Image (cartoon, rainbow, N blue to C red):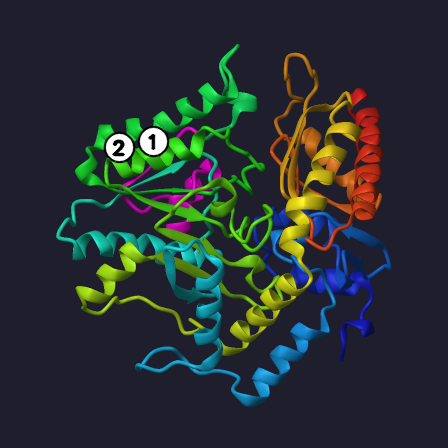
Amino acid sequence: MTYQNYSLKQLQQIDAAHHLHPFTDHKELRETGSRIITHANGPFIYDSEGAEILDGMAGLWCVNIGYGRDELADAAYAQMKELPYYNSFFKCSTPTPVLLSKKLAEIAPKHVNQVFYGSSGSEANDTALRLVRHYWVLEGKPEKNRIISRKMAYHGSTVAGTSLGGMDGMHKQLNGAVPNIVHVMMPYAYELALPGESDHDFGLRAAKAVEDAILEAGADKVAAFIGEPVMGAGGVKIPPVSYWPEVQRICRKYDVLLMLDEVITGYGRTGEWFAAQTLGIEPDTITTAKALTSGYQPLSALLVGDRIASTLVEKGGEFNHGYTYSGHPVACAVALKNLEIIEREGLVDRVRSDTGPYFAKALQERIAGHDLVGEVRSIGLMGAIEIVKDKATKERFLPSGSAAVVVRDHAIANGLMLRATGDTMILSPPLIWTRDTIDMACERIGKALDLAQADLRKR
């Protein structure tokens, strides 16, 4: 029996009876019922009641080439027919992860040439944490095991990913984090810059927080700094241009490894294959997932720089880490075809030279002036809209985060899927969006803001 044989109410009842959703208030969900998404095409998703919704989040930051790509389905089918699965243990490999690794080395920063596979960004960050600490053991410095991260960072939902991340609510539920991970201030000028402080000076001050944490622990105790080039789930927080060069200088000065989490920004989102290239960062590891397959298959790839890889190989010994699905042949076949499509259709160049700049201009000209908007910001095809009660003072509505949810709900009701993170609306659309799609999105955002403003005035 297929889902078409069930009514929406029946599907919602079954969902409530058996399905635990991620990041969900399950009591609230059971009271309201899930929206059931049944199919999708191009930049649009469709629910069980026939509503067409422009997807402003690319699924969950991942569907870069849009929906309904037969080529990816065909690649998965062909690989399943030939070899649906074999593992990468026992000194074995299969063709597709071998070829995918070669392709990733070609498009990654020039000093990054090795790949370790998993099935999610969380797994990739677990791997990165273990690999970095193992590296320092191999180098004869096991005491270098502290990781510096940032408040409001998101690095996944596993125990290690949650510990690396800087979200208080997740830490409270974890009730005991991985030790020797500390968190410093985030480069979020809109809320954290001092009165009269320039973006440049704020970026240097935010970077200095990393140096202060190194000095507090002692450089001989610090293994690495981990950060998203642009903080995604925390609210598309784009650091000032002074920030990353200074962080990189600090890491090199104290011999601290630099770990980039590009689970969201990788594979074209910022107008280069990786945000490391957009922002001029030379990392030791790059965590990727999501858009590697455009979400059509679960796959992550930890890209490992030559410094770590050389030590791992030359000093030998078994790295006691891996997953059943590391280098899954079907997922890797889909990833190869996905990267081929991104390249063939010039989507990375389009984001850099056309849709990215147009997106930034449209947000500034059509959204920034609204009474509810304190700031808009974007890089490539990812953006944020700060929701405020008072533009001049940056005062927020109370309770915190409540106004953004009102905006989000109106946006979805008017055919645009957006996400609310705290008091910030965030966008991360498929890279296939055109200027026309951006215009459509801005029109629907504007309508949602108007409707939300009317609702909020009643409070």
Circle number at residue 276:
none
Query: Crowding near pointer 2: few (<14 within 10 Å), some, many (20+)?
Result: many
- Image quarter hosting the N terminus: bottom right
- Image quarter hosting the C terminus: top right
At horizontal 58% and vertical 36% (from top left) the residue drawn is 235
Q: Provide residue 130's location: percent of width, then percent of height.
A: 30, 56
Does the CB distance between marks 1 and 2 fall below 8 Å? Answer: yes
Q: Provide residue 22's location: percent of width, then percent of height.
A: 57, 53
Q: In this view, does 74 lie above or below 28?
A: below
- Give left or right: position of 367 versus 73: right
- Give left or right: position of 118 versus 401: left
Residue position for label 1? 210
Does 172 appear in magenta?
yes
Q: Indicate the amino acid at tag 2.
A: Ile
Residue 49 visible, this orientation: yes
Does 54 appear in magenta?
no
Q: Which residue lies furthest to the bottom in this view?
A: 82
Question: Quadrant of the rendered structure where residue 448 is?
Answer: top right
Query: Crowding near pointer 1: few (<14 within 10 Å), some, many (20+)?
Result: many
Residue position for label 2? 214
In this orientation, which residue lies closer to the viewer: 448 or 83?
83
- Give left or right: position of 437 versus 421: right
Q: In this view, does 29 lie above or below 240?
A: below
At horizontal 82% and vertical 33% (from top left) the residue drawn is 446
**Residue numbers of the magenta segment:** 160-185
Q: Indicate the amino acid at tag 1.
A: Val
Q: Provide residue 436's location: percent of width, then percent of height.
A: 83, 47
Q: Provide residue 227's location: percent of width, then percent of height.
A: 42, 41
Question: Quadrant of the rendered structure where residue 81 is?
Answer: bottom right
For label 1, the SS is: helix
At horizontal 39% and vertical 28% (from top left) the residue drawn is 207
Q: Is residue 313 above or below residue 54?
A: below
